Amino acid sequence: MAARKILKFSLWSFLLFVVLPISLVGYFLIETDAPVIHGKVYSHIQYNERQNLDLYQPTKQVYEKAPVLVYLHGGFWAIGIKEAINNTRFNGAVNELRDAGFAIVSPEYTKARADRSPFPYCIEDAYETLLWMKHNSEEYGLDMDRIGLLGESAGAHIALMAAYSEASEFGVEEETPKIDYVIDVYGPNDLKKIYQLELLDSIKTIREQFPKEYQDYLDLPKFLLGFDPELDTVRTKKILETYSPYLRVDSEVPPTC
């Protein structure tokens, strides 16, 4: 009798905690027409020592080698996952691009921690994504002469920085493939404006209501810079200027929309 009860409990637990969540995720992916359910997808490919990427191959072969669009997810440089491409407003566009013969690359990138800024590491990751594509273009049929970047929020900022800068400035010595265009979806162009947002004042007020040991995790400027900006304003100003894409705009930057 006891064994039967244990078996029954185990079965219900399996249904509740395994089958049901998998079914809900599957339903969601189908309902939203997520790119991952179409065509060939290579998941979790390591492209440097720290990060991985997903490669969504074209669903129709239109070109001998596929043009590539690199998608960089958002999340205030602190959260977000590469799989977010399956849960965004871009699902339809990504599916249409793959039908038109494009490959889509969605990489992870270095996030902020309480004791470490994401800069310059997240930008290095963008360049190293391009290098992985270059080194593996023959295996996966990728066209290194037709590459675009699509970024949302923090991801758009990283895309702009990568497109408007030289890789060597961020410690990447090997020549990276040329970026033909950038699609910027509300990416921050002037980081100094982060400190002028009313949202940050609201967050600061909320943060002060939390126990002290949790306040650092809600201190967004400190989280982004890796130190308290009020304790070193000169260093803060230099970092914000260095990582503000609008200060890098010249006649040589790729077309941006």
Image: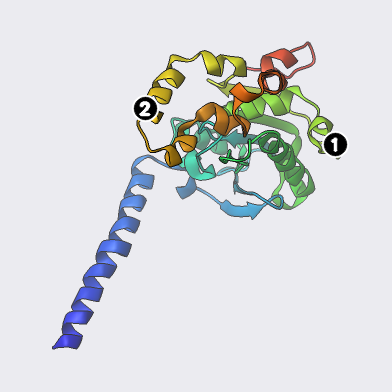
| Closer to the camera in the image, 64 or 248 | 248
Q: Residue at x 84, y 33 (%)?
A: 168
Q: Residue at x 64, y 49 (%)?
A: 51
User: Pointer 1: residues within 10 angstroms few (<14), some, or many (20+)?
Assistant: few
Give the percent coordinates (x, y) of residue 249. Answer: 73, 13
Residue 22 is tagged as: none
Answer with mark 1 or mark 2, whichever residue precedes in sequence.
1
Q: Residue furthest top?
A: 251
Give the percent coordinates (x, y) of residue 205. Answer: 38, 23
Q: Nearer the viewer, mark 1 or mark 2?
A: 2
Residue labelled with disc 1: 175
Q: Residue furthest left?
A: 1
Question: In the rendered image, which quarter contains the N terminus?
Answer: bottom left
Q: Give residue 166's quadrant in the image.
A: top right
Regarding residue 153, the answer to whether it shows in the image is no
Residue type of the residue flagged with mark 2: Ile
| Closer to the camera in the image, 242 or 22 | 242
| Apparent side of residue 257 relative to residue 83 in the rendered image (left or right) | right
Asked if the residues shown at circle 1 and circle 2 are in contact, with their CB atoms under 8 angstroms apart, the answer is no
Q: Residue at x 52, y 49 (%)?
A: 39
Regarding residue 19, the answer to whether it shows in the image is yes
Vertical comparison of 29 with 257: above or below: below
Give the percent coordinates (x, y) of residue 123. Answer: 69, 34
Question: In the rendered image, which quarter contains the C terminus?
Answer: top right
Residue type of the residue flagged with mark 1: Glu
| Closer to the camera in the image, 178 or 33 | 178
Q: Secondary structure at mark 1?
A: loop
Residue labelled with disc 2: 206
Give the percent coordinates (x, y) of residue 203. Answer: 41, 25
